[in-house]
Image (cartoon, rainbow, N blue to C red):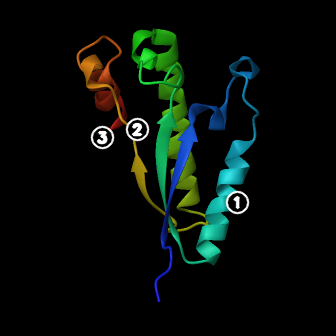
Amino acid sequence: EGRVTHVRIPTGYWLFSEDAVDGYVTGGERYLFRLLDWLKIYQMKAVLVLDELPGRGSASGSFFDSKEAFDVAQRFIKRFAEFVLRSNRNKLTLDVIVGVEPLKEPPWRFWNDAYGLRTFYEAEVP
């Protein structure tokens, strides 16, 4: 009999919100950890997706138009990567995260912009 084995979990930069001005409730990190713990209990795996970055609530791609938004995104991604590493060292969530999608559906028209995709991937993907 079949069963669900993997879950795709979309996340946003507010998961590690730095500023109440963002308008998002803080504390999401502990709920994501809790979800990963539940997945471990049920022998499931997770793929985490960087679904939303600053200014990326639509296909407009404004995250690439602003150095401030780009810098916030860079800090989020660093904290996100640290979370993934911590989760993979914790016995409660060890081996649950099997993948990370670095940027959902990036607008390719921003490839060569000053704060565009090329800059993003060169800075974030080793």
Q: Which residue is mark 2?
A: 104
- Which secondary structure, mark 1? helix
Residue designated by label 1: 34
Query: Left or right: where does residue 110 sit relative to residue 20?
Result: left
Viewer-nearest of discs 2 and 3: 2
Q: Position of residue 24 (x, y in %)?
A: 72, 29
Estimate the spatial distance between the alpha carbons at disc 1 and disc 2, rounded to whole Å.
23 Å
Quarter of the picture holding the C terminus: top left
Q: Which residue is mark 3?
A: 126
Residue 114, position in %: x, y? 31, 11
Q: Which residue type does callout 3 highlight?
A: Pro
Left/right placement of residue 104 relative to residue 125 reads right
Q: Earlier in the sequence, mark 1 or mark 3?
A: 1
Q: Residue furthest front?
A: 1
Residue 46 can be seen in this image: yes
- Which is in the foreground here, disc 1 or disc 2? 2
Residue beneath the point at 73% across and 17% down = 21
Does 5 sit above or below residue 59?
Answer: below
Amino acid type, mark 1? Arg
Rate crowding at label 1 as few (under 14), some (14 to 19) or many (20 or more) other CA atoms within 10 Å: some
Could you tell me which residue is drawn at 23 percent across and 16 percent down?
Answer: 112
Q: Which percent across, then down, holds residue 62?
A: 44, 15
Q: Is residue 30 above or below residue 19?
A: below
First of labels 2, 3 by sequence position: 2
Residue drawn 45% across the image and 10% down it: 67
Kindly identify the amino acid type of the residue bearing the numbered disc 2: Lys
Which structural element holds mark 2?
A: loop
Q: Dots 1 and 2: beta carbons under 8 Å?
A: no
Q: Are there few (<14), some (14-19), or many (20+) residues within 10 Å of tag 2?
A: few
